[in-house]
């Protein structure tokens, strides 16, 4: 076995040297790869493999390795596939289902460990759809490359992307939209659907103008999240590390969880808000909350707006500042801290409960941190 690997390494080394020598002496080399058949050096000769008009498309199924993909508006149905001949693609169309696949042998043995690209890839798959096209399902799986989907009408959209940028614009889906990206940016603008799931492992996320009938579920491992203009029933966002910015949201239930990073909310309206932070600040302004629950391990809390129902804030380490669009008598309150300064309308007060027989309540507790509550009426 050791001898086999030594031979493989030797062949790969020789191939790389030949590729570099070719470039030095003016060869038109684009890169190299190693597969089951050995080491290959390919030229920079890209070609339009296929281009044709096809009949109406009802489903799209793409399973490829590493090229850019676009779904764009056009006058009629059609596609272009522009790539190296070595990439070995197959396309099929039957009963409205359009399928694009990359050769399984090429996918299995085109190992990134033995691949070297000397120039920028130019490969792309472009699918054309007329504006009145209505698809059942569009399913896209791509290991690497850029993805752009614009002006698409469908029932379901599924995107599983490995590395690269994902851009979704002007999409209407009657049922589900599921977008997953391992590394790279996700941009979504003007999306309507029944339910939405977005998952990002590493990269940035910018989502705006969402109108979702049921739920929105967004998760990230290490990324910056910016969400703007959302209407939905249930909104759930979870981040492991990184800041989360949410502005202009209206929902029944809003849940935000962050392991390490801040959560910023502006102009949010919901029956129930729930925020959980391990290490980071919560800053929520212009809120209209039916019930608010906040749990923070370490970090300051600053919230302002209209609060009805129950407002419960617990902080182990950090200050709590609340600015209420209402009067003190509208809230029964229970305020306490183990170490910190307590103030109501900037007047120092003692710990304990005050009962005004009000419909609304505030229960605020810190282990170490100040509590300041200001009533604006």
Image (cartoon, helix red, strand yellow):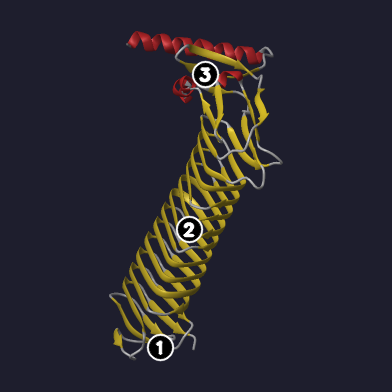
Residue at horizontal 54 percent and vertical 34 percent from the top: 95
> Foreground residue, 343 or 150?
150
Crowd rating for badge 1 (residues with CA inside 10 Å; few <14, some 14–19, many 20+) = some
Query: Which residue corresponds to mark 2?
Result: 244
Residue at horizontal 69 percent and vertical 14 percent from the top: 26
Which quadrant holds residue 233?
A: bottom left
Q: Which of the two labelled residues, at mark 2 and mark 1, occupies the earlier sequence position?
A: 2
x, y (%) of residue 266? 52, 68
> Foreground residue, 77 or 314?
77
Crowd rating for badge 3 (residues with CA inside 10 Å; few <14, some 14–19, many 20+) = many
In-image side of 143 versus 311 (left or right): right
View extreme (right): residue: 75
View extreme (front): residue: 95
Query: Which residue corresponds to mark 3?
Result: 33
Q: Which of the two labelled residues, at mark 1 and mark 3, occupies the earlier sequence position?
A: 3
x, y (%) of residue 287? 49, 73
Residue at horizontal 67 percent and vertical 16 percent from the top: 28
3D distance between C-alphas at marks 2 and 1? 32 Å
x, y (%) of residue 61? 51, 35
Query: Which residue corresponds to mark 1?
Result: 330
């Amino acid at each position: 076995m050791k001898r086999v690997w030594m031979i493989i390494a030797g062949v790969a080394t020789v191939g790389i040297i030949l590729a570099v020598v070719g470039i030095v002496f003016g060869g038109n080399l684009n890169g190299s790869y190693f597969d089951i058949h050995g080491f290959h050096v390919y030229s920079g000769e890209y070609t339009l493999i296929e281009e044709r008009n096809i009949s109406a498309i009802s489903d799209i199924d793409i399973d490829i390795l590493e090229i850019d993909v676009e779904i764009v508006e056009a006058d009629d149905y059609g596609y272009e596939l522009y790539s190296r001949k070595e990439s070995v693609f197959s396309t099929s169309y039957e009963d409205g289902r359009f399928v694009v696949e990359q050769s399984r042998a090429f996918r299995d043995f085109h190992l990134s460990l033995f691949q070297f690209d000397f120039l920028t890839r130019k490969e792309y798959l472009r699918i054309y759809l007329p504006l009145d096209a209505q698809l059942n399902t569009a399913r896209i799986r791509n290991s690497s490359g850029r993805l752009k989907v614009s002006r698409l009408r469908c029932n379901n959209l599924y995107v599983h992307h490995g590395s690269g940028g994902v851009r979704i614009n002007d999409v209407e889906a009657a049922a589900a939209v599921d977008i997953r990206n391992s590394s790279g940016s996700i941009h979504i603008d003007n999306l309507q659907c029944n339910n939405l799931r977005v998952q990002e492992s590493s990269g940035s996320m910018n989502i705006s103008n969402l109108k979702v009938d049921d739920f929105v579920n967004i998760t990230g491992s290490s990324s910056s999240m910016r969400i703007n203009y959302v209407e939905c029933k249930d909104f759930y966002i979870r981040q492991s590390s990184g800041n989360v910015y949410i502005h202009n949201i209206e929902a029944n239930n809003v849940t935000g969880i962050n392991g390490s990073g801040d959560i910023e909310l502006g102009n949010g309206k919901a029956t129930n808000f729930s925020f959980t932070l391990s290490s980071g600040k919560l800053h929520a302004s212009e809120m209209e909350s039916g019930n608010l629950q906040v749990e923070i391990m370490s970090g300051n809390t600053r919230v302002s707006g209209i609060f009805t129902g129950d407002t419960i804030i617990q902080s182990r380490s950090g200050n709590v500042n609340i600015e209420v669009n209402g009067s003190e008598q509208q809230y029964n309150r229970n305020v306490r801290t183990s170490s910190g300064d307590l103030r109501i309308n900037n007047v120092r007060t003692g710990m304990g409960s005050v009962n005004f027989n009000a419909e609304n309540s505030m229960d605020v507790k810190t282990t170490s941190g100040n509590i300041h509550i200001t009533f604006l009426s």
